[in-house]
Every structure is written in structure tokens, then in C-alpha cells.
Image (cartoon, helix red, strand yellow):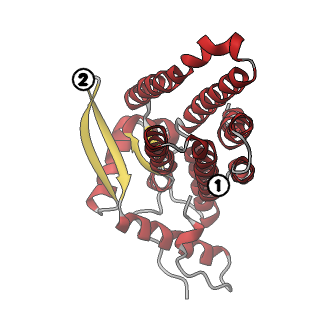
Amino acid sequence: MNNERMTPQKSISVIEDAMRKAQNETGGARFYLILWGALIAAYALINYFNLKFPASLNMVANWSWIVFPVGGLFSFLRTRKDDKTEVSKPLNDKLYMYTWGGTGLCLGAVSFFAINYGGLLIVPPVLLLLFGFTAFVTGGVTSFVPSIVGGILCIISAATAFVLPLEHQLVCTCVGVCTSTLVPGLLMKKQHA
Amino acid sequence: MLNQLDTLLHSQHRLAIMSLLMSLEEAEFVYLKEKTGATAGNLSLQLDKLKDAEYITVKKGFKKKYPVTICAVTQKGRAAFNQYVSDIKAYLEPGADHPADKESIAV
């Protein structure tokens, strides 16, 4: 590219080309969506099978909570790596950070109060509602249709989970989390591979 | 009546720089150099001109003990870019009405 004077058509071409290059910088959102989608889906499935077959999976289920600190550690390490290596910051980074971060904080609060004051049955549907809402909003703002669709499916899973016993709520959790985070994350990764 | 194009933006490198920064929150010097294909000296010159016009901010810092230059577009730069795009469209379609439309530029 040289710095010559341009025709209007050339100007538009320069703008479009540059914006296309910049929009390919998607940031690390897909990593976190895949990581947390897989971990929470695995957590839900392990606990579902533990309720179904308590004798076989009791030990594994007792330790299943470890997925959360492990996920936190991987997230922290990835953030540090990105801070050191990334040379541009997409506009959507803050959107993902605050929406999903806020979702995590809300879930932490709901889980804390549910465990300490009773009401464990409320946790899976609330988790699904929060995930569905966040996926829907981020999908809409970034015009990423799989997140919009996944968000809606997750909200439907939440509505279903409200009227189900705990073990079936866990299945809904697995499905909802996969549609709202894991699948969109994998599609994002494929799109920008 | 067609507006006079912003001479600061009507330059291939500076327009490419502004277009990239409009789509990002911020970008480092090396990123802009890679995407625009400019030499380091030329890019520095163009960034200085944009900074003097207050279209972009340029911050210098350190990353892994190496100096790093980070650029971001300002509100004034966004407005100027949107106006430039509107004016360019008017040149391409002289009969149509093209008010400066921020939403058409938003990512």
C-alpha cells in the first residue's frame, strides 16, 4: 500500500478492506465459551449420573466441584497469556467480559444463598436463565446468530427445568449450557480458523 | 453540493489506520504496521499527523519489558471518519442524501 491520492472508489475499498481485517480479530471469547460450556455440562452430567447410579459415581461426584476452580485457573492463565500476546483489542471484548462476568457473579451469589439457606432446586433453572439471557444479548449485539438461537434454547431449557425434579434439571442444564456456550464457541472457532 | 473531503483522512495509509481503529477498541503499532503494510517510519509519521489532529490517542507503555505504542480513535476522530464516509458516498452517488450516519459505521 502506498500513500498516493485516492479516488472515492479506492477510499471505500481501503475502508472495507481494513474493517474486514479488524473484524476478524475476535478476541478470546470463543476459548472461554468452550471451556466453561464443557466444564459446566460435564459437572451437570456427572451429578445426573451420580443421582441415577449413586453407588458407581459417588466418589467422582463428590469431587465434581473441582471443575470450577480448575476453570477459573485456566481462565486466569489464558487472560494473562492474551494480555501479553495480543496486539489489538476488539470492540466486543468488554461486552463479553462484563456480561459473562456478571453472569458468573450472579450465579455465585445464587449458589451461595441456595446452599446456605435452602433452595438448591432453584440453581439450575436460574443458571440456565442467566446463560440464556447473556448468550441472547451478546449474540444480538455482535450479530452472531448461533448465540441468539442458543440463548433462546437455553431459556426454554430454563422454563422446563423449573417444573422438573433435580436429576432432570441437570439434564436440562447440560443441554442449555451446550446450546448457549459450547456450540456457539465451537462455531466461532471454526468460523475464524 | 459536495463537501470538501477531509484531506487528513483522504490519504491511503491514514484512512486505513482510521478504518482499523474504528473497528477496534485499541491496537498496537505492530498490528497497524502489519495490517497497513506501511514501513515503521511512514506509520509513525501518519500516526503523528492523526494525533496532532486529535483523531487518535497514542499511548506508550511497556509489555514484557519492551516498549509498546497503543493507538485508539477519539470521539473527534469517529465523527470525522463518519463525515468522511458520508462525503465519499456523496461523491459516488451525487443525487442521494447521505447525512453522517454513525450506525452505518458501527461494528
Disc 1: which residue: A136
Disc 1 sits on a residue from what chain? Answer: A
Say whether residue A176 is left or right of residue B51. Answer: right
Say above or below: A134 vs B105. above
Q: Nearer the viewer, residue A2 or B26?
A: B26
- Amino acid type shown at disc 1: Phe
Q: Quadrant of residue B65?
A: top left
Q: Does residue A6 appear anywhere in the picture?
A: yes
Q: Residue at x 67, y 22 (%)?
A: A46
- Residue A152 is situated, as x and y percent measured from the top left of the image, at 72, 54
Judging from the image, mark 2 belongs to the subunit labelled B
**Do the residues under discs 2 and 1 have CB atoms within 8 angstroms?**
no
Quadrant (top left, top right, bottom left, bottom right) of the N terminus of chain A: top right
Mark identifier at residue A15: none
Considering the numbered disc 2 on the image, is that residue within a helix, a strand or a loop? Answer: loop
- Residue at coordinates 38% horizontally, 39% vertically from top-left? B28
Left or right, residue A157 beside residue A130: right
Task: Pinpoint residue B36: horizontal percent, then vertical percent.
Answer: 50, 42
Which x, y percent locates residue B68?
Answer: 30, 34
Marks 2/1: CA–CA distance: 40 Å
In the displayed structure, A177 sits above or below B66; it is below
Q: Is residue A132 above or below residue A64?
A: below
* Pick the front one: A43 or A9: A43
> Where does label 2 land, which residue?
B65
